[in-house]
Image: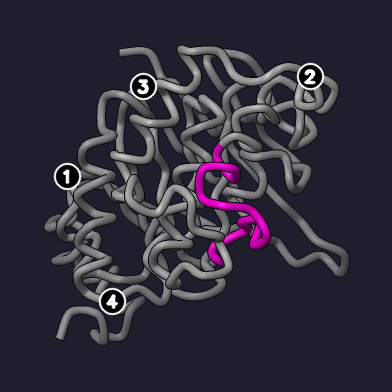
């Protein structure tokens, strides 16, 4: 199967010579759910930053659907189908849940179009489906500022889905969530497998264990191990990196 996303020998070096990424290789197939694990400073978020165009690689290649995208601006990659969700929800507090999704849908078309006519019937159908998918259909007319933290996390995920992105880059989507909210996000991501290609950065091992996902472990800017959750969980080097704390 052809790689939907391929990272080859990727390096990101910051001022002063610090290498946040040091020769990272990654292959993700279309429709795959992939988790990036690793301790703080491993390079997980930097890898998402490079793929989404937030930082420019110092060396190496990033291929999306077979085309080089390394160094491409964020807004251009968003138009090309790369969606990014950050750890802290970036929703518009003064708008309702539905209005946030409308704004996200229009951004896909560009700023000028967003000032034009309303959405098509097909686009409204997608928004309704997305509301149901993230469990916010009963909150459609509620202002984002009135939502709980977990609901805001789900709203931002819905906004990324509303852009029509084919590749979703999610940075700690369960941060600050309750156990039941975390389980709901795990269920959602499992249901997205096959329909979307998803790369998730996470620290919550219980959450990762609920995902039917391949796992890539990063350490000091390099790939340490890849495999199933159980394979990496039992690996002695991975256990040493985490000092046993996540596996007690």
Check whether the beta carbons of the residues at disc 1 and disc 2 lie within 8 A of each other: no
Residue at which label 2 appears: 116
- Give the label, 1 or 2, closer to the camera: 2
- Give the label, 3 or 2, closer to the camera: 2
Instruction: Mark 3: give few (<14), some (14-19) or many (20+) Cα within 10 Å.
Output: some
Magenta: main secondary structure equals loop
Marked residue nearer the N-terminal end (4 or 2): 2
The CA distance from mark 3 to mark 2 is 33 Å
Q: Residue at x 37, y 66 (%)?
A: 174
- From the image, which quarter does the C terminus lie in? bottom left
Residue lying at the far front in this picture: please name it.
141
For the record, the magenta segment spans 87-101
Residue at which label 1 appears: 212
Instruction: Name the side, left or right, on which 61 lies relative to 15.
Output: left
Marked residue nearer the N-terminal end (3 or 1): 3
Q: Nearer the viewer, residue 247 or 126?
A: 126
Pinpoint residue 30: horizontal percent, then vertical percent. 36, 21
Marked residue nearer the N-terminal end (4 or 1): 4
Pinpoint residue 247: horizontal percent, then vertical percent. 18, 79
Q: Residue at x 82, y 28 (%)?
A: 111
Residue 98 sits inside the magenta stretch: yes
Residue at which label 3 appears: 30
């Amino acid at each position: 199967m052809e790689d939907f996303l391929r990272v080859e020998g990727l390096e990101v070096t910051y001022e002063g010579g610090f290498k946040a990424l040091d020769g990272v290789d990654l292959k993700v197939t279309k429709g795959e759910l992939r988790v990036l694990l690793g301790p703080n400073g491993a390079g997980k978020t930097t890898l998402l930053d490079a793929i989404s165009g937030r930082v420019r690689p110092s060396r190496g290649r990033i291929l999306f659907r077979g085309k080089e995208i390394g160094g491409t601006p964020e807004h251009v990659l968003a138009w090309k189908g790369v969606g990014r969700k950050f750890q802290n929800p970036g929703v518009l507090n003064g708008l309702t849940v539905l209005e946030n999704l409308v704004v996200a849908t229009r951004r896909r078309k560009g700023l000028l179009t967003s000032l034009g006519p309303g959405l098509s019937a097909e686009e409204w159908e997608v928004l309704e489906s997305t509301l149901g998918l993230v469990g916010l259909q009963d909150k459609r007319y509620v202002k984002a500022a009135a939502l709980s933290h977990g609901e805001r996390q789900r709203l931002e995920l819905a906004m990324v889905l509303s852009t029509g992105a084919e590749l979703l880059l999610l940075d700690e989507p369960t941060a600050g969530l309750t156990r039941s909210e975390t389980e709901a996000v795990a269920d959602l991501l499992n249901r997205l497998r096959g329909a979307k290609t998803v790369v998730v950065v996470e620290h919550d091992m219980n959450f990762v264990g609920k995902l039917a996902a391949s796992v890539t472990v990063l350490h000091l800017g390099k790939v340490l191990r890849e495999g199933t959750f159980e394979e990496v969980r039992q690996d002695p080097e991975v256990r040493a990196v985490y000092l046993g704390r996540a596996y007690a």
